[in-house]
Image (cartoon, rainbow, N blue to C red):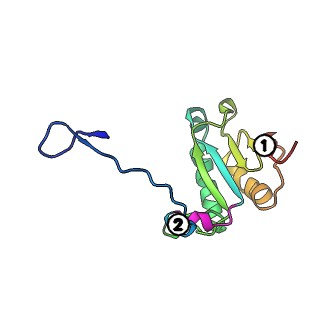
Amino acid sequence: MFFDANAPGSVAKYTRMAEKKFIEDREQLEKLAPMLKAPIKRQVFVCTGKSCTAVGSAAVKAEFARILEEKGLRQGKESKGRNPMGEVVLTECGSIGFCSLGTAVMVYPDGTLYGQVTAGDVPEIIEKHIKNGEVVRRLALMELPCSNEK
């Protein structure tokens, strides 16, 4: 239950929250979350924490969005200019852990962490890494081992 301060006719009213449902039917899941059908290959995280914001993370994220959408790679709703069957999910996050080397970007599942990324670096990351699987060495801080590597 939660407190509803705006409940009409009373100063305080508690409202019962709906029970959580676990959906097992794949077809129903896909209706609720169409991205489940998309052939997603990578997720790009752009840090928008305080330190990264101070060095231009908004421009970096905007450039990723612009180019990925232009190339039809960004997964998302068509109504937002994205491709429902796109291969890349673009996500902003609070911190990747390299705040002093911002703007920080991580490409998953590859586990590559990039630092000091500018909007001007984004086309190279997309062309080399996102499209062709080649790490941009001049920006790479580290590569996390994949779970299938020993």
The kind of residue on which mark 1 rests is Leu
Judge from the rendering whether residue 136 lies leftward or rightward of residue 66; answer left or right. Answer: right
Number of numbered callouts drawn: 2
**Residue located at (11% from left, 44% from top):** 9
Q: Quadrant of the N terminus?
A: top left
| Secondary structure state at the residue bearing disc 1 | loop
Label 2 close to label 1 by CB (< 8 Å): no
Residue 44 location, x and y as percent? 67, 51
Residue assigned mark 2: 77
- Span colored in magenta: 33-40
| Secondary structure state at the residue bearing disc 2 | loop
Q: Is residue 126 above or below residue 145?
A: below
**Residue located at (57% from left, 38% from top):** 94
Judge from the rendering whether residue 119 lies leftward or rightward of residue 28; answer left or right. Answer: right
How far separated are the C-alphas under marks 2 and 1? 31 Å
Q: Quadrant of the C terminus?
A: top right
Residue 62 location, x and y as percent? 58, 53
Q: What label does residue 139 carry, if any?
A: 1
Q: Residue furthest top?
A: 100
The kind of residue on which mark 2 rests is Lys
Residue 39 location, x and y as percent? 68, 66
Residue 59: say if magenta.
Answer: no
**Residue located at (65% from left, 62% from top):** 68
Residue 113 location, x and y as percent? 74, 41
**Residue located at (55% from left, 70% from top):** 27
